[in-house]
């Protein structure tokens, strides 16, 4: 009995170590492969017809404004006004009646002068994988500039390119290190999950009718 317990503990320890190694490798690999395609400078990016703005909540749980949200909005406005893009897909969560990331982003962009007819809403962007694949399969975009913070763009651009898209990332300003600690820790796990999804060929949760972007 003691031998069985000892062997079981060894097995789970090895499994744990293997998991840590896999996560470290996945994070390094995704960062390295996406680095040439992402930038904080618009001049470093090629022009593309369409950008994909990845959603997040506009407010924190305590009711204060979410800096991630507003920094992404500012980045999208800059990208549009410098002429790098002509259209923007807003992809985010709309899982409940009172929570609508795409519409929140749309209102914020329009307040900054982006015309409504240049904006397309994707209400089924529940995960980054869903957002990037739907940009290709539903909205018909094979070349795209993804807008989010650097840590998120690394994963999004990686996933898009692994799914046959010519994807680039425009990095919105990050938040201070303390405010972003939990988010960055979650991202460490999310990068490992991105590889898992590729290995098992995970598909978006929802399909839908094709949307024509002029």
Image: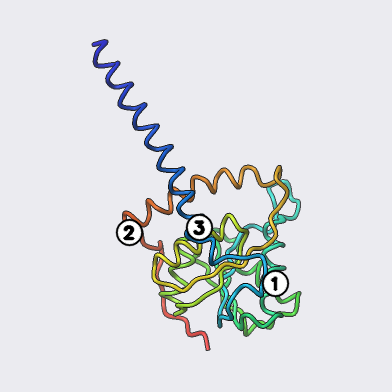
User: Residue 40 placed where, x, y %?
Assistant: 66, 65
Q: Residues within 10 Å of mark 2 (few under 14, many from 20)?
A: few
Q: Secondary structure at mark 2?
A: loop
Indicate which disc, 1 or 2, sits on the residue closer to the N terminus. 1
Q: Is residue 126 visible?
A: no
Distance of mark 3 from mark 2, alpha carbons?
16 Å
Q: Secondary structure at mark 1?
A: helix
User: Residue 89 placed where, x, y %?
Assistant: 56, 74
Kindly identify which numbered label has been placed on residue 76: none
Indicate which disc, 3 or 1, sits on the residue closer to the N terminus. 1
Kindly identify which numbered label has been placed on residue 201: 2
**Pointers 3 and 1 in contact (C-beta within 8 Å):** no
Kindly identify which numbered label has been placed on residue 155: 3
Indicate which disc, 3 or 2, sits on the residue closer to the N terminus. 3
Q: Which residue is mark 1?
A: 107
Residue for point 70% across, 59% down: 173
């Amino acid at each position: 009995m003691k031998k069985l317990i000892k062997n079981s503990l060894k097995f789970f320890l090895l499994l744990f170590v293997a998991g840590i190694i896999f996560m470290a490798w996945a994070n390094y690999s995704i960062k390295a492969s996406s680095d040439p395609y992402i930038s904080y400078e618009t001049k470093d990016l090629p022009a593309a017809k369409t950008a994909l703005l990845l959603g997040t909540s506009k407010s924190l749980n305590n009711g204060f404004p979410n800096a991630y949200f507003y920094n992404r909005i500012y980045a999208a406005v800059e990208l549009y006004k410098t002429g790098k893009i002509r259209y923007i897909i807003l992809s985010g969560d709309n899982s409940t009646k009172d929570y609508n990331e795409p519409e929140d982003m749309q209102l914020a962009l329009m307040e900054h002068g982006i015309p409504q007819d240049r904006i397309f809403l994707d209400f089924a962007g529940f995960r980054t994988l869903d957002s990037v694949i739907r940009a290709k399969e539903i909205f018909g975009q094979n070349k795209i500039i993804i807008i989010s913070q650097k840590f998120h763009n690394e994963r999004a651009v990686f996933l898009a390119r692994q799914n046959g898209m010519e994807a680039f990332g425009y990095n919105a300003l990050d938040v201070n290190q303390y405010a972003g600690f939990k988010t960055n820790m979650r991202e460490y796990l999310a990068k490992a999950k991105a590889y898992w999804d590729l290995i098992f060929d995970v598909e978006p949760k929802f399909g839908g009718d094709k949307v024509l972007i002029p």
